[in-house]
Image: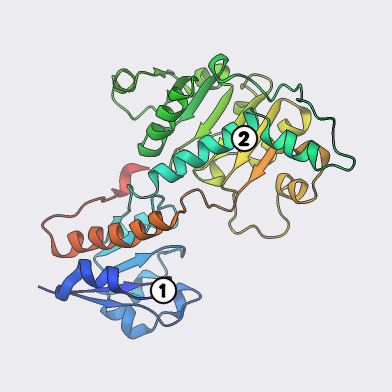
Amino acid sequence: MTATVLYSENSYPDDSVERRIYGADVRVIFPTSSGSLADLPDEDCAAAEGLMILRFKVTAADLPRFPKLRAICRMGVGYDNLDRAAAAERQIMILNVPDYGTTEVADHAIALALSLRRGLLLHHEAQRDNPPAAWRYIIDPLVRRSSVQTFGLVGMGRIATAVALRAKALGFRVVFFDPYLPNGVELGLGIQRAATLQDLLRQTDTLSVHTPLTRETRGLLGFEELSLLPRSAVVVNTARGPIIDIDALATLLKSGHLAGVGLDVVPVEPPVEPVPELLRAYRAREPWTLGRLIITPHSAFFTPQAWDDIRSKSAETMRAALLGPRPQNVIPPESD
């Protein structure tokens, strides 16, 4: 039994990792150049039984070009760039790679939270000012001892679990909200569980978001919800940009209700003009953002080791789907 796997993007110097995992049973096609899915040659699309996707979107309009397609693997954790309903109609499996970059994203979320809560950015900005600030600590609501704070998590998957354990080790009281987890998860982790999102927000000093982007979670945290956070709270998002209303973040940060915001994701990536006010003010170094706002370019997942994991784990996932013994990391179409 053999199969053909088409990579939509060629981001690697060679195909040694893929050849080692697929072996002689899989024909691997890497594009010579591809600015979009539409740039892939028709003959390659017609032959593909497996399609590997990193950044591109796959819509219902794209699928007729792939008559033999049996599986699409999103080479990452999130799969919101794939039209799962259209794939299901054609009996195409949607796969992801949930176990790469877990530690990197968890570390990044904690780093964003601590760089704000320990006042690193406040001092960084103050000491590079002209003239520099006095050589002393800054008294600000942003700076708080970990052990007097509640660290709240929205979602409790693999990454959030890693974040929870790190936050707990740092002395935070850790609470999460995830209506899809069975009872007792909190007991195994030694943390607490909130019955509702509103209950979580009302008690959270530092909030970290870790849900996938679905119909249910899009816009989950708007102005009304974020306003439930205690004054001088911090919000960190390393999940997906559209989960949080970025304009509400701007309003609440500017007013002082939020003391700090750390984002690795924004609603449109890469940002296009006109950019949201929060990003515009950040780039313009407006005073209300200095020391209180960090934005990184969806880089939380990255280390060279995580990049290698993407290659190997996605190839293993696709091989299992096409050649067996059984598919793994299958995302059901009804899991929205």
Amino acid at the residue labelled 1: Asn
Amino acid at the residue labelled 2: Ser
Which residue was labeled with disc 1? 10
Task: List the single residue furthest toward the front.
Answer: 135
Residue 17 higher or lower than 93, as above or below: below
27 relative to 136 in the view: left or right: left
Dot label at residue 145: none
Q: Which quarter of the rendering shows the N terminus?
A: bottom left
- Of residue 104 and residue 250, the one placed in the foreground of this image is 104
Residue in the image at 58% along x and 39% along y: 244
Give percent across and percent down for residue 16.
29, 73
Give percent across and percent down for residue 329.
26, 50
Q: Are marks 1 and 2 in contact (CB under 8 Å)?
A: no
Badge 1 crowding class, 10 Å Cα cut-off, few under 14, some 14 to 19, many 20 or more, is: some
Residue 304 higher or lower than 110, as above or below: below
Which residue was labeled with disc 2? 115
The image quarter in which residue 62 lies: bottom left
Residue 182 higher or lower than 87, as above or below: above
Question: Sequence-wise, which precedes: disc 1 or disc 2?
Answer: 1
Cα separation, mark 1 vs mark 2, equals 35 Å
